[in-house]
Image: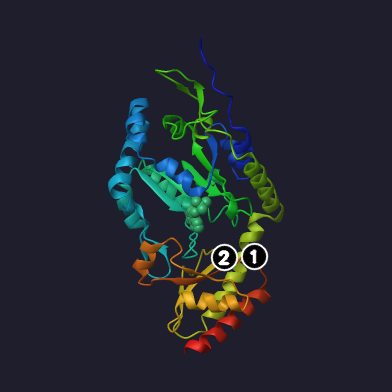
Amino acid sequence: MSLKPLPGPTGLGARVIGHLKGWPAAGLLFVTVLLCNALQMLSLVFWPVSRPLVRRINREIANAWWSLCDLWAEHWWKIDIEITGDDGQLDFQWLDEQLARARLLSLTHLSNTMRTVNPVAEICARARAAGVVTVVDAAQSAGHAPVDVQAIDCDFLTFSGHKTCGPTGIGVLYGRRELLEAMPPYQGGGEMILKVGYRESTFNVAPHKFEAGTPNVAGAVGLHAALDYLDAIGREAIFEHDQRLAKRACERLAEIDGIRIFGPAEGRSGVVSFVLPDAHALDLATMADQKGVALRAGHHCNQPLLAKLGVAATARASFYFYNTEAEVDRFIEVLHGVRKIFV
Ligand SMILES: Cc1ncc(COP(=O)(O)O)c(C=O)c1O
């Protein structure tokens, strides 16, 4: 008896990913998996156990995944992007040297620390030319900027619901079908399997084989509604608004003696990360909070980067479509007030 896989592309996932520009044209080659969050998706892609199984399935793909798993085990930190100075610019020569000996490149689209908007399409093109699999982390960009998967032309892209005004506990992985098909399932449960036997089982096709058990249907419906909401506002409009407020904040912050503002002069997103010479970022954030201004302070899940910049923590203001210029001015006013306590 031959078993037919469930028809693809996936229902909920395809509807959700339909919000990414370029998806319809890529629909046959790419598949969307829905799990809990962005990092769970990245873990699925980086999962080292893929190595022996993928190797048996397809030699060409295996080469990439086999080496990927070697990278995971021994060298994964080496694919951290090299930057020069506080402006967070990527050193392309360094990148090309790394690509020559890598099998997988994972990078963020927008940096949550440096404001950098990485030229992901160009980076992915360089990686492709070097035969390197690309994984774009769009957690910071999916809710803030246009994300055109066709133009970026990566192998995988991921983002999470809660950073797109959607629910927590749901994340999206958009991936090249042939790579996903070559990967083994990593969780067991309903729908990921077609036939179960004592000695041998048949797994479903991607994306179903990765979506084990009862899916987070409520999360997918909520995420879909959130993405509809963002679409109605428009990612271009959101990005332009965020940038305008961040620019205003940067200009006002630059008036403060000794301030270090991180990130490039051009191509920036709507976050402003900074340190003051006379006040710790955590103190700043705590005191600003008491005045009704929400800053985030810490290493922003980027300890290696902050170590490279020689700081333990930065304070960060993040702007979104609901923020106003008056709020930027209030933030600066509060910051000046807080500084008086320390100077
Ligand atoms: C670039 C980036 N990727 C991933 C994450 C984590 O996302 P999730 O909580 O959905 O795993 C974050 C969180 O701030 C992030 O900034």
Coordinates of residue 164 in the picture (x, y in percent) = 61, 53
Name the residue that disc number 1 marks: 241
Q: For label 2, count other residues whose C-alpha is less than 10 Å away and answer few (under 14), some (14-19) or many (20+).
A: many
Colour style of the rendered protein structure: rainbow
* Residue shown at the point (47%, 52%) measured from the top left: 120
Whether label 2 touches label 1, CB < 8 Å: yes
- Height in image: 257 above or below 104? below
Mark 1 C-beta to ligand 1 under 8 Å: no
* Residue shown at the point (53%, 45%) measured from the top left: 36
Coordinates of residue 131 in the picture (x, y in percent) = 36, 40
Coordinates of residue 337 in the picture (x, y in percent) = 57, 86
* Residue shown at the point (53%, 31%) measured from the top left: 208
Q: For label 1, count other residues whose C-alpha is less than 10 Å away and answer few (under 14), some (14-19) or many (20+).
A: many
Name the residue that disc number 2 marks: 270
- Height in image: 203 above or below 310? above
Viewed as shown, does residue 221 lie left or right of 50? Answer: right
Cα–Cα gap, marks 2 and 1: 8 Å
- Residue reaching furthest to the front: 198
* Amino acid type assigned to the residue bearing label 1 in the image: His
* Amino acid type assigned to the residue bearing label 2 in the image: Gly
Nearer the observer, 129 or 81: 81
Secondary structure state at the residue bearing disc 1? helix
Rendered image quadrant of residue 4: top right
Mark positioned earlier in the residue sequence (2 or 1): 1
Nearer the observer, 18 or 152: 18
